[in-house]
Amino acid sequence: MDERVREHAAMLVDWSARVDAGDDVVVSVAEDAHDLGVAVAEALGERGATVTTLYGSDELSRAYLKGAEAGVDSGDSDDSGDSDDSGDADDADDTPIFDDDLAVDRAIFEAADAYLRIGGGRNTTATADVSPETRRAYAKARKGVREARMDTDWVSTVHPTRSLAQQAGMAYEEYRDFVYDAVLRDWEALAAEMSEMKAVLDAGEEVRLVTERDDAPDTDVTMSIAGRTAVNSAASVAYDSHNLPSGEVFTAPYDTAGEAFFDVPMTIDATRVRDVRLVFEGGEVVDFAAEAGEDALADILDTDAGARRLGELGIGMNRGIDRFTDSILFDEKMGDTVHMAVGRAYDACLPEGESGNDSAVHVDMISDVSERSRMEVDGEVVQRDGTFRWEDGFEE
Amino acid sequence: MDERVREHAAMLVDWSARVDAGDDVVVSVAEDAHDLGVAVAEALGERGATVTTLYGSDELSRAYLKGAEAGVDSGDSDDSGDSDDSGDADDADDTPIFDDDLAVDRAIFEAADAYLRIGGGRNTTATADVSPETRRAYAKARKGVREARMDTDWVSTVHPTRSLAQQAGMAYEEYRDFVYDAVLRDWEALAAEMSEMKAVLDAGEEVRLVTERDDAPDTDVTMSIAGRTAVNSAASVAYDSHNLPSGEVFTAPYDTAGEAFFDVPMTIDATRVRDVRLVFEGGEVVDFAAEAGEDALADILDTDAGARRLGELGIGMNRGIDRFTDSILFDEKMGDTVHMAVGRAYDACLPEGESGNDSAVHVDMISDVSERSRMEVDGEVVQRDGTFRWEDGFEE
């Protein structure tokens, strides 16, 4: 085993999840993420934690959902006394109704101290033929489970697989180097740097982001952050940070107005989405367009009322990530980028007891801010062309 | 996907576990058992059940246990202030102490209606270098979890993997045919035949098994079965049967006396065991020997007081299984065989509220009874040379 797999496991268990002896830890292992699962199990045994291992297989999820769709179809044909192929016209009625009393899954996360999700997989489009309606119905049924899971010390990471390398357009060995460069960092040093950004956002009331590139539509968007707390996301639950790698500072904005353009390509629910433009009025998306995947974007925005409002503004600060790989875990953390998410806000950004934007979705969209851009907080420039105020080369 | 994989999944879900809409089903998927996991997930979606998938990886288990051993080692060296390699002399103190408050695992099985264990794996000796002491300590810590699991509608099966084919000494395609011949049977017809054997055992008070082969030590052993109920193990929880394939009738004997010889080779905790001889007095093993694996056998018998008494007498009646494959799931069900297990008895064989032989272990040993053998119940011959009283060719 590559020694970096063991280092990754130790980073996940010790730095990220802060596992102690006696902790009950649930680990989800994706297809082809076996090696990191083994290294994590070994680390948990050594720390004196308990371990329960879930199989996070996209192909199993797809089979379950397709089975549920088939179950509805055959149920319909029973009712009508007709043959199976009569049901094609009423697709809307073919969406399965999922049991939302998920006793086992809820029990798992209610009993767990920590949850370590190891992504990976053998095909990033393994669930491509599941209908958006079925996905949404299942996501809604799992809301309670998701909430219980987010009450644990949860951390999401990936094991570098060939499928993810392909998604990134990289050779396998090259992609492994990329992942470990992003993950195996001096997180304490990065946390110290990110605390500067957090201080600015915590003190600020309004953020304005402007980009004026020749080759892309302009961004000029303002949002309120008054009363909100920024998260110094240093890849550890001790920082309210739940991704490994991380390396961003994010907060929960509101009252967004203006236009924003997101030029970094991404994949949402197995659909390629590119060059998204969102128009905000009174905190809501009132118009949108995309060069590719506009239907998928429309589906997201139509999920519920909260899906048209921002849940997150994030500033990428991990300079160990040097390219886009079509994986949100990495892309949104990259230095010289800013992202905004429509949908659910994170509780850590909100005053105690106050609830932020609520939604079944949370979809991040990313802008490259390395050139001809500026971010202002209360009228003062904090970042210009990717360089922060406290860095060498910053120009007011 | 081979259509037999889907047939296997349907047999498991419908015939064996009797899954209904709304049932909460936990599925454990071994390494390389992915395809059957996918087919089972699809079937569960279609039936309207919920699914939670565990990853039943032997390599993860081994890593966790080796990590726990390493944790003890480093703990010892902390105490002594000495270097790691000083600990080799006190192996006994190096056995990890496992947390027996397994909140997550217990919660899973307390909440589950059914548990489907899909074995498979990539290496049947994947845990070979874990010490017997560590195995035993972990098995003891998991006693509560095991009991909660056995209170569900649980069923154990295997997906045919290359590793299991190798264990059986068979080509992969050949082994797949073997597994599906054993699994995809007319279980109702076999249940009807097995009910004859159950009737004999339920009415009987004493069983005597005699073998007199030239090439092996004799067996002549008697045991009481008065008051015990035989299980017609027809591969369905509706028959108190929890294996797919099954095809045996078993009961919980006591007061065993005499000598028994088990000629079918088997693998216990990654150790090859062959030609076991057990001598019983007053219900207990008082002497034992084995041509191979005698130490592993001694470890088993020393586990606890119940490990020296029989928990099971079983009569194999699945004639779809035509050879030994060094897998207890198949070997003990084969026609022309009888097996006895030291250790834990199954509740289904006992009068309501009465507890049978209790132990942390349950280890089956098998005799070929195809030649020069007879089984008597209360002095009447029920099976001679493998042929039952109700079959053509039976000789009194």
Image (spheres, coloured by chain):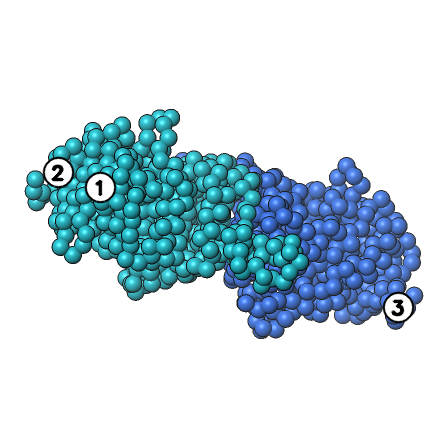
Chain colours: A cyan, B blue
**Residue identifier under label 1:** A258
Residue occupying image coordinates x 45% and y 57%: A127
Alpha carbons under labels 1 and 3: distance apart: 91 Å
Asked whether B353 or A171 is in front, the reply is A171
Rendered image: mark on residue B144? none
Residue occupying image coordinates x 78% and y 43%: B350
Q: In the picture provided, is B49 more to the left or to the right than A231?
A: right
Q: Chain of mark 3?
A: B
Q: Chain of mark 1?
A: A
Kind of residue at disc 2: Val
Q: Is residue A280 visible?
A: yes
Residue occupying image coordinates x 81% and y 64%: B211
Q: Chain of mark 2?
A: A
**Residue identifier under label 3:** B394
Front disc: 1 or 3: 1
What secondary structure is marked by label 1?
strand
Position in image of residue A342 (x %, y %):
33, 43
Q: In the picture provided, is B99 more to the left or to the right than A189?
A: right
Sequence-first disc among 1 and 2? 1
Asked whether A378 or B232 is in front, the reply is A378
Few, some or many C-alpha atoms within 10 Å of disc 1 (few <14, some 14-19, many ≥20)? some
Q: Are marks 1 and 2 on the same chain?
A: yes
**Residue identifier under label 2:** A381
